Image (tube, rainbow, N blue to C red):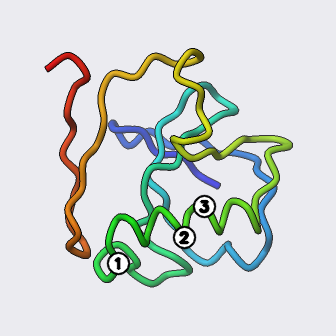
């Protein structure tokens, strides 16, 4: 796997995933530390633009299904936002989505 930050700096990650998930699958993640990432969204699934044709609810469910079936957190942990305890990492805000396929989320800070 490769992690690209907002400055497009690339980091190679050694991860345990099933081989059926290696054909250009692109997640949008936030790095908590070098070995732990929160998976927020799914852009491409095996080379197909999944984001444009599915709602956020559908994409979130597919992320949960993929991680449950194909991912083993032995080297790098990929987790959903629901798996991260709020006491461990303070929540700065939430992304809100509409029900339209391909729409982008809007970040709303907690202190508003």
Distance between the alpha carbons at the discs numbered 2 and 1 = 10 Å
> What residue is drawn where x is 45% and y is 50%?
40
Whether residue 70 is situated above or below residue 46 in the rendered picture: above
Secondary structure category for the residue under label 1: loop
Tell me if 53 is positioned left or right of 21 in this view: left
How far across and how far down the image is residue 96, in percent? Answer: 24, 48
How far across and how far down the image is residue 35, in percent? Answer: 70, 32
Whether residue 43 is situated above or below residue 73 in the rendered picture: below
Distance between the alpha carbons at the discs numbered 3 and 1 = 15 Å
Secondary structure category for the residue under label 2: helix
> What residue is drawn where x is 45% and y is 84%?
48
How far across and how far down the image is residue 23, in percent? Answer: 61, 78
Q: Find out whether the residues at labels 2 and 1 contact each other: C-beta distance under 8 Å.
A: yes
Viewer-proximal residue, 54 or 45?
54
> What residue is drawn where x is 49% and y is 58%?
27
Q: Which residue is at the far left?
A: 112
Q: Which of marks 3 and 1 is nearer the N terminus?
A: 1
Distance between the alpha carbons at the discs numbered 3 and 2 = 5 Å
Quarter placement of the N terminus: bottom right
For disc 2, the marked residue is: 62
For disc 3, the marked residue is: 64
For disc 1, the marked residue is: 54
């Amino acid at each position: 796997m490769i992690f690209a930050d907002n400055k497009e700096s690339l980091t190679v990650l050694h991860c345990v995933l099933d081989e059926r998930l290696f054909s250009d699958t692109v997640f949008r993640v936030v790095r908590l530390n070098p070995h732990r990432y929160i998976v927020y969204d799914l852009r491409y699934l095996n080379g197909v633009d999944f984001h444009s044709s599915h709602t956020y609810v559908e994409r979130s469910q597919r992320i949960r299904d993929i991680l449950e079936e194909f991912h083993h957190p032995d080297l790098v942990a990929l987790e959903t936002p629901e798996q991260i305890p709020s006491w461990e990492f303070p929540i700065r805000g939430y992304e809100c989505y509409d029900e339209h396929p391909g729409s982008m989320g809007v970040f709303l800070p907690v202190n508003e």
